[in-house]
Image (cartoon, grey):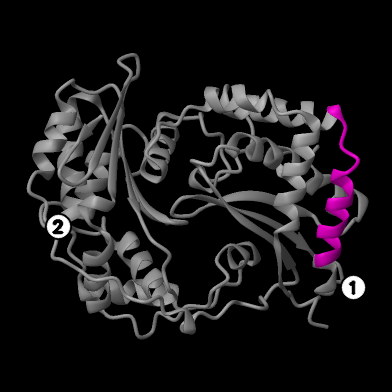
Amino acid sequence: MILLSGPMVLQYPDAALDRATIQVVIKLPELGPREEMAVRAISDLMMESTAEYSKPQIMRWGGQCGFRPTVELMPGFVRMSISIPPEQVGTGISIVDSVLRRSTFSDQALNEWKLTNQTANSDYWKTALWPQTLSVSDLRKSDLRDAFVRYFRPENVTIAIGGNFPSDSPQKLETRFEGWVMPRTVAIPLDLNRTKNTLSNATSTSTIELSGQEIRLTDADFPSKLLAIFALGVGKGSTLFQVPRETMGLTYRQELLLWPTPKGFRIRMILATSDPEFSPAKGGAVRDSMLQSIGTWTEAHRSRALGAAEGLLIYGNGVSPFAITGQASMGESLERETQIRAYWFATSGIEWNPKSYFDIMKLVDLTTLKESAQTLLEKSEVRVILGLQGRK
């Protein structure tokens, strides 16, 4: 680990691999809707062109290992990813530097982006994940410049390089970003008065969200809460699957997500239903039924949760609740493993150590597990987005 004057650089070498990856995490504070839209546009446009590279050049140099270079807005941060052969790491560092500091946001690129993003979201799941209604029509290039200066700053950036790379690569990163200075900026109040939560969507599916409290990575009881999360909502044996779907017959899709926040995660349990008799009151009924179910948990529920946690944290198998990795296994690739290491350190200042977390989880008894799950669920808020069926 090298502490620079600006970005933090983490290194995870593995000479047995056939490639290196550079994962960049740009931490974001809570954003109002206008700032979120500007940051989304920046993320989508950063690799369109830079002062040194065109998009075809970035894709050609950065796609040699079969992984498309990307910049994407994630919950609470922006992620950049590029993978390169060991002998091309210098070029990869140059591209990352150019994209981070010298992207060119042309009027044409912004106008094309606005055209593709101006239609209302008709995907019920995306509407549930991002329920704010944001208008792109009045987004200006100056909004992008202001947001770039405000959020894409060296002190917000963590860079992790993993895999097979020359030993001097971290030092080259340090040299590249030496002297990266951004203009001073001031915090602006969130434009929360402009936030409009979507209350309906244009599909036949309604969604229920049970939105829980923030869980900080530095909390002493984080491992016990994490085990409760596996018991509540990870896998077909979880309460989230068994109660609303199997017992109540209400939902056909249900997922628990750990949604990134500036200090950790917020629990989001999202359920989809096409029940023609659905009403918003059923959202509260789902939470009440799940709370009752927790009281009936036995050692079998604890053992199942531990098995799911072990599969994911130790062996990299199974569905991940962490929204920083999507719904794929956390250990399935060098890129995802390096990404979660970068995010964990950027958020908490501590290294990602899944074995340590799992060792503590094994010590959590059934009583503590049930209490943790009940606390997490009792403090959740219910949000319903009605589909066409629910609005009849």
Q: Which residue is at 15% across, 44% downward?
A: 5
Q: Quadrant of the C terminus?
A: bottom right
Q: Is residue 390 above or below residue 296?
A: below
Quick one: SS at disc 1? loop
On the question of residue 359 being in view, the answer is yes
On the question of residue 311 being in view, the answer is no
114 or 247, nearer to the observer: 247
Q: Which residue is mark 1?
A: 277
367 or 17, nearer to the observer: 367
Q: In the image, 30: left or right of 269?
A: left
Please state the horizontal and vertical placement of residue 252, each as a whole percent of the image. 79, 55
Q: Is residue 216 above or below residue 31?
A: above
291 or 120, nearer to the observer: 291
Q: Which residue is at 14% across, 57% downward?
A: 102
| Quadrant in the picture for residue 132 | bottom right
Name the N-terminal-most of marks 2 and 1.
2
Q: Which residue is mark 2?
A: 102
Magenta residues, start to end? 284-299
Please state the horizontal and vertical placement of residue 85, each as a whole percent of the image. 25, 27
